[in-house]
Image (spheres, rainbow, N blue to C red):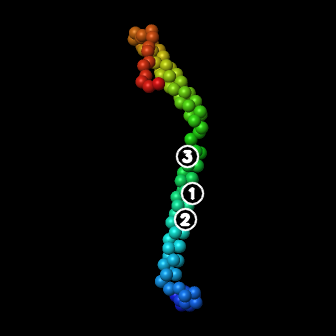
Amino acid sequence: MLAVVQAHTSSLGAKVEDVLRDVATHLAMQIDERGRDLAFVLDEQDRMRRERLLPPEQSLINLTKYDAHLNRLLFQAMHELEAFQARRNGQPTALARVQISAGG
């Protein structure tokens, strides 16, 4: 292969070292460009994967509201059950309970 390069460069009047350096520079630039292309594709895949994992923002807001509501209902039912059990066992129970929670 070196003989082919030497024959080609001698017919053009160029030095073999200059031609090889130009080829190496060109290949390095192509490798760098392919690396950037790969990074872009991987970033795009990650973005698309995240979009598929999370529902739209309004759906998340609704889910949060429903979760909070169900959580309040669960605690209310648990407190009522505790009061019924205490009354059944003859223990005095409060007529009203106040649930205080931190957060919005």
Residue 3: x and y, percent? 54, 90
Is 42 left, or right, of 87 in this rendering? right
Q: Which residue has dot 1 on it?
A: 41
Q: How many dots with numbers?
A: 3
Q: Position of residue 36 (x, y in %)?
A: 52, 61
Around disc 1, counting alpha carbons within 10 Å, would you say few (fewer than 14), some (14 to 19), or many (20 or more)? few
The image quadrant where one finds the N terminus is bottom right
Badge 3, how many Cα within 10 Å: few under 14, some, many 20+? Answer: few
Which of the two discs, 1 and 2, labels the residue nearer the N terminus? 2
Q: Residue at x 59, y 45 (%)?
A: 52
State whether residue 68 is above or below residue 51: above
Question: SS class of the residue under badge 2?
Answer: helix
Identified at 55% across, 57% down, the residue is: 40
Residue 26 or 53: which is nearer the viewer? 26
Q: Which mark is residue 32?
A: none
Element on which disc 1 rests: helix
- What amino acid is labelled 3 in the image? Arg
Q: Amino acid at mark 1?
A: Val
Assess whether mark 2 and mark 1 are in contact (beta carbons under 8 angstroms): no
The residues bearing labels 1 and 2 have C-alpha atoms spaced at a distance of 10 Å
Q: Is residue 4 visible?
A: no
Q: Which residue is mark 3?
A: 50
The outermost residue toward the front is 13
Q: CA distance from mark 2 to mark 3?
A: 24 Å
Q: Earlier in the sequence, mark 2 or mark 3?
A: 2
Q: Amino acid at mark 2?
A: Arg
Residue at point 42%, 10% (across, down): 94
Q: Position of residue 62 (x, y in %)?
A: 58, 30
Residue topped by disc 2: 34
CA distance for labels 3 and 1: 14 Å
Closer to the observer: label 2 or label 3? Answer: 2
